[in-house]
Image (cartoon, rainbow, N blue to C red):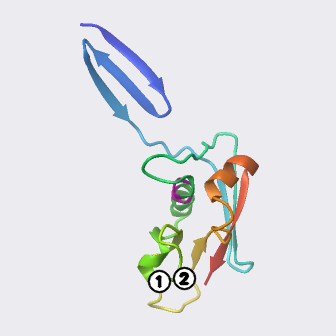
Amino acid sequence: MIFHEFSGCNNVFYTIGHIAYINYTLTLERKMKVTLDLNRKSCAVEREKTDKKFYDSSWSSSESQFLYAVLQALKAQGLDVIKKRMWKDGHMVDDTQLYIRTKKWGILDDGKQFAIYNQHYAIYDAGERFNEYGEVVLGVVQ
């Protein structure tokens, strides 16, 4: 029995004979700094050295992957938020635009509800901007 291990990019490939096994592990070691400031209506995201870059793929855009990473960072801070397409909530925007919002949107007006989105969606992709400059400031609506 021949056993080889190849590792890279959070995936570990094992081959035993002619059969390949893939052990996919999702690591949330991204330490991007997400600063949510409800008073200034902004959410600043800064890259750390260990953060991955976001690229378009056949199944998602780099902005979608970037917002997912921001979502995970906000959840790690204890916020109950989801990522959703804006048009599904009745907003008249492009059908591919995404945003992060609190789960209980519009039920109670207690000042704790908010939505985070790319204010410049038509101009640039937030994931590509994050790759290039290392910082993106997203808009916040309450």
Name the residue: 34% across, 21% down.
14
Q: Which residue is mark 1?
A: 105
Q: Dot 1 lies on which element?
A: loop
Compared across the picture, whether 99 is left or right of 47 comes to left
Q: In the rendered structure, which segment of residues is drawn in magenta? A: 64-68
Where is residue 61? Give x, y as percent.
Answer: 52, 54
Q: Quadrant of residue 5?
A: top left
Q: Which residue is found at the position 40% from the left and 27% from the top?
A: 12
User: 59 left or right of 73?
Assistant: left
Taking the magenta stretch, the answer to whether it contains residue 67 is: yes
Amino acid under label 2?
Answer: Gln
Q: CA distance from mark 1 to mark 2?
A: 6 Å
Q: Which mark is residue 19?
A: none
Q: Is residue 108 above or below residue 11?
A: below
Specify the quadrant of the image occupied by residue 39. bottom right
Percent x, y of residue 63: 57, 57
Q: Which residue is mark 2?
A: 113
Q: Nearer the viewer, residue 118 or 32?
A: 118
Residue 7 sits above or below residue 122 on the image = above
